[in-house]
Image: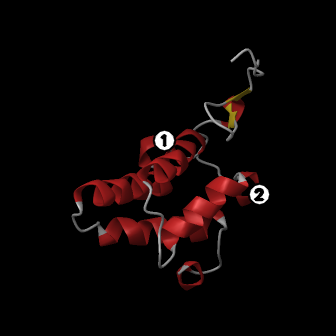
Amino acid sequence: MSQQQRTNDVSVDAIPVDVANTQSGEVDPAGVPEEIESITRGLAGEQPPTNPLVVLKAARWWYIHGKGGTDPAFQWAIEWVRHLATDTPSDVERFDAFLAYLVAVGFADEKAALR
């Protein structure tokens, strides 16, 4: 608890938050922490994570470092958590927008490569 954090590197867990680069809308795939990239790729895969807390960790990172509440990765993560919590079908259009966004930011060359 006595560990001090630099003002430009604040986090509530092991994933750093770069305060100077928050909600810039410009996401560089090389700047995405390995754990967040893994969770994000999992959300795009055939067997996405089933632990809502893990998914919310990724949602938080995308909210802070992406486009805020309008970030497609954030929106899909929240949609997936809703699906896990309520067992209702997820929004296919939101998933498609998520895949397109991952291609746009450079996670893959095409959507099919993410699945």
Q: Amino acid at mark 1?
A: Gly
- What residue lies at 29% left-to-right and 66% top-to-bottom? 91
Q: Secondary structure at mark 1?
A: helix
Q: Residue at x 51, y 51 (%)?
A: 54
What secondary structure is found at the residue carrying circle 2? helix
Side (left or right) of 65 relative to 96: right
How far across and down, in percent of the image, does residue 106 sit? 67, 67
Q: Position of residue 96 (x, y in %)?
A: 41, 72
Q: Quadrant of the N terminus?
A: top right
- Measured as percent of width and height from the top left, residue 38 is found at 63, 63
Vertical position of residue 53 compared to residue 43: above or below: above
Q: Are marks 2 and 1 in contact (CB under 8 Å)?
A: no
| Label located before the other in sequence (2 or 1) | 2
Q: Nearer the viewer, residue 33 or 102?
A: 33
Q: In the rendered image of this protein, does residue 100 appear above or below residue 62?
A: below
Label 1: which residue?
68
Q: Residue 21: percent from the left, percent from the top?
A: 68, 36
Total numbered labels: 2
Q: CA distance from mark 2 to mark 1?
A: 19 Å
Q: Is 89 on the left-hand or right-hand side of 99?
A: left
Looking at numbered disc 2 in the image, what kind of residue is underneath it? Ala
In terms of image quadrants, where is residue 5? Answer: top right
> Foreground: 65 or 25?
65
Left or right, residue 21 beside residue 48: right
**Who's the residue at 63% across and 36% down the image?**
13
Q: Which residue is mark 2?
A: 30
* Front residue of 5 and 25: 5
